[in-house]
Amino acid sequence: MTGIKKIKGEEGSLKTILFVCVENSFRSQIAEAYFNKYAPEGWKAISAGIEPAEKVHPNAVKLMLEEGIDISRKKPQMLTRELQEKAEMAVIVCSGSLCPVVYTRHVEEWNVPDPAKMPLEEAR
């Protein structure tokens, strides 16, 4: 959560952080869920992808249930201009050449390998 306390949104408004990966089925979904569970007051997270999968990866659901967080009803969504415009900050949580370009006030890139391509034990 580097830099979050430094970011100022409109007074009294809920500030939004946008987590982005390619399919919005694993990395960004987990990041959104963890952030919303532990978010600083006045912050919320959303997530999106440039090529959204049909559903959240089953291993992501399993891993989050182990943490007491249910993301089974979440649906991957397309990264849109509107989502970028309402975000105070974006965090790109993928690695490689398919990582999207995001246009928000603040952008961080976290080089996170794709756990969807790993066995469940390794994804932990």
Image (cartoon, rainbow, N blue to C red):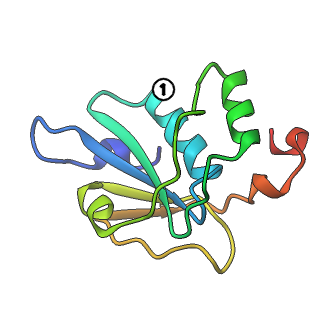
Q: Is mark 1 on a helix, strand or loop?
A: helix
Residue found at x 29% / y 47%: 6
Please state if 2 lies on the left or on the right of 30 as rendered: left
The percent coordinates of residue 97 (x first, y second) are 65, 80
The residue beneath circle 1 is 37
Q: Nearer the viewer, residue 36 or 107?
A: 36
Q: What residue is shown at x 31% (from left), y 66% (from top)?
A: 104
Q: What amino acid type is highlighted by mark number 1?
A: Lys
Q: Is residue 38 above or below residue 31?
A: above
In the rendered image, residue 16, in percent from the top left (x then y), is placed at 31, 46
Q: Which residue lies furthest to the left in this view?
A: 11
Vertically, is 117 above or below 80?
above
Give the residue at x 36% y 30%: 40
Residue occupying the far top of the picture: 68
Question: In the displayed image of the protein, which residue is found farthest to the front?
Answer: 54
Residue 80 left/right relative to 15: right
Residue 101 lies, in percent from the top left, at 46, 76
The image quarter containing residue 65 is top right
- Left or right, residue 62 beside residue 87: right
Q: In which quarter of the image is the C terminus?
A: top right
Picture mark count? 1
Quarter of the image holding residue 62? top right
Q: How many other residues sit within 10 Å of disc 1, few (<14), some (14-19) or many (≥20)? A: few
Q: In this view, does 86 lie to the left or right of 5?
A: left
Residue 30, compared with residue 18, is above or below; it is above
Q: Whole-percent x and y of residue 113?
A: 74, 60
